């Protein structure tokens, strides 16, 4: 009896359904193997050579001696290692956009670093500004503003002016000094820079409560909200990226960003009823005045307390404003392709039109 006749006999005779089902499955499995065997070519070689592809998979290879502000990271803990890998992988994935961040860091870190040193704050805290704003004068939905994302109440508590005409949170140097004061106040409580950095995100009281409730004095032992819980790990990822770009596969594309121009300082201790007229009086225009003094948010400067304000005016009148404008006025979304090729007159016109809006 042939196999085909035997199979037909089984299906024609009264056989339990489950036996027919098993037989069907076995039959289809046998047919599949036969097809694979017949179609198999022993001379065919599987090509695993992707030499023509530009795609490369880079391992994370997280450094084993990570530290923040001189405080070692306990990387032998599984949970900590997993959190590090998450942040390192996330930062590794935006390799292309990180090139712009490199240029911004080269431009702004030389301004931030001396202030941190003078205030006695570890240099690693400059990466907090990257996390907070990507080194831009952005405004959050909650009202935080500037490179360091200071809230109005916090800024005023530390002596900055925040009103409809002046917002000193947008003055990078003054805002950096205030951020340093916050870091040092937190360090006074915790005697630990890692906790001080975390407190910048959630507040000194927030970290104090978490330490008390969870009976620990170590950031890495705390169970926090997602943002604060990943804050230090994100700092470490940015620190590694910016101090060692090849670690993330960023190669051969980093250009030296131009430094800030030489300034002349104009001091004023009276009110200014018209900033445009004032700019013309000191030999410049409104665009240059507000680009290098972004803390001027109004059209006039009422100064009833006779406070002395210092205005920075570049000595070189032919400076390319687009290099600085996108950082101090990021919300305006200036046409970057136009600014790269426009003359100074065209550039000023574009920026003027944008400011009017």
Image: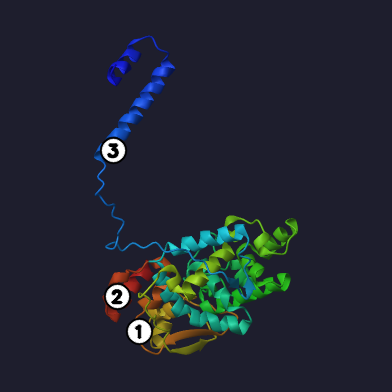
Question: Can you see residue 31?
Answer: yes
Q: Is residue 155 above or below residue 40?
A: below
Quarter residue 283 falls in: bottom left
- What residue is pinned by disc 3? 37
Disc nearest the viewer among 3 and 1: 3
- Which tag, 3 or 1, sits closer to the chain's start? 3
Quadrant showing the C terminus: bottom left
Return the mark for residue 238: none
The residue positioned 47% from the left and 73% from the top of the image is 242
Task: Give percent across and percent down for residue 311.
Answer: 48, 84
Q: Is residue 335 above or below residue 346?
A: above
Tell me how far mark 3 sits from mark 1, CA to CA: 73 Å
- Residue 332 percent coordinates (x, y): 39, 67
Which label lies toward us, 3 or 2?
3
| Contact check, label 2 and label 1, Cβ < 8 Å | no
Q: Which mark is residue 340?
A: 2
Colouring method of the image = rainbow
Question: Looking at this view, is 25 or 187 the one in front?
Answer: 25
Q: CA–CA distance between discs 3 and 2?
A: 63 Å
The quarter of the picture where residue 261 lies is bottom left
**Rendered-image quadrant of the N terminus:** top left
Residue for point 51% across, 77% down: 172
Tag nearer the camera, 2 or 1: 2
Q: Could you classify mark 1 by the number of other residues whose Cα lies within 10 Å: few (under 14), some (14-19), or many (20 or more)?
A: some
Indicate which disc, 2 or 1, sits on the residue closer to the N terminus: 1
Closer to us: 76 or 82: 76
Q: Residue 41 at x, y = what percent?
A: 24, 45
Would you identify the image quadrant in which residue 299 lies? bottom left
Q: Is residue 106 above or below residue 238?
A: below
- Whole-angstrom CA distance, mark 2 to mark 1, is 13 Å
């Amino acid at each position: 009896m042939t196999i085909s006749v035997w199979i037909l006999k089984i299906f024609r005779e009264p056989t339990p359904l489950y036996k027919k089902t098993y037989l069907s499955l076995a039959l289809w499995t046998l047919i599949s193997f036969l097809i694979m065997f017949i179609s198999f070519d022993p001379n065919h070689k599987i090509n695993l050579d992707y030499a023509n592809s530009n795609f490369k998979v880079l391992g994370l290879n997280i450094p084993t001696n990570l530290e923040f502000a001189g405080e070692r990271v306990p990387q032998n803990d599984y949970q900590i290692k997993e959190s590090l890998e998450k942040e390192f992988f996330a930062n590794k994935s935006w390799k292309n956009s990180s090139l712009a961040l490199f240029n911004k860091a080269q431009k702004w870190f030389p301004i931030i670093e001396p202030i941190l040193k003078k205030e006695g704050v570890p240099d690693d805290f400059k990466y907090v500004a990257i996390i907070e704003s990507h080194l831009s004068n952005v405004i959050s939905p909650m009202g935080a503003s500037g490179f360091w994302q200071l809230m109005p109440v916090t800024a005023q508590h530390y002596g900055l002016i925040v009103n409809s005409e002046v917002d000193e949170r947008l003055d990078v140097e003054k805002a950096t000094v205030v951020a340093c004061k916050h870091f040092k106040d937190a360090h006074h409580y915790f005697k630990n820079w890692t906790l001080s950095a975390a407190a910048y995100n959630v507040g000194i009281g927030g970290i104090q409560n978490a330490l008390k409730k969870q009976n620990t004095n170590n950031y890495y032992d705390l169970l926090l909200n997602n943002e604060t819980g990943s804050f230090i790990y994100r700092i470490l990822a940015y620190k590694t990226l910016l101090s060692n770009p090849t670690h993330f596969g960023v190669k051969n594309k980093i250009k030296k960003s131009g430094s800030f121009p030489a300034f002349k300082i104009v001091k004023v201790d009276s009110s200014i009823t018209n900033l445009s007229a004032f700019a013309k009086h000191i030999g410049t225009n409104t665009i240059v005045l507000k680009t290098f003094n972004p803390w001027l948010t109004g059209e006039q400067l009422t100064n009833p307390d006779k406070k002395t304000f210092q205005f920075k005016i570049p000595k070189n009148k032919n400076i390319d404003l687009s290099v600085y404008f996108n950082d101090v006025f990021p919300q305006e979304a200036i046409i970057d392709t136009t600014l790269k090729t426009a003359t100074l007159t065209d550039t000023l016109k574009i920026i003027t039109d944008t400011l009017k809006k």
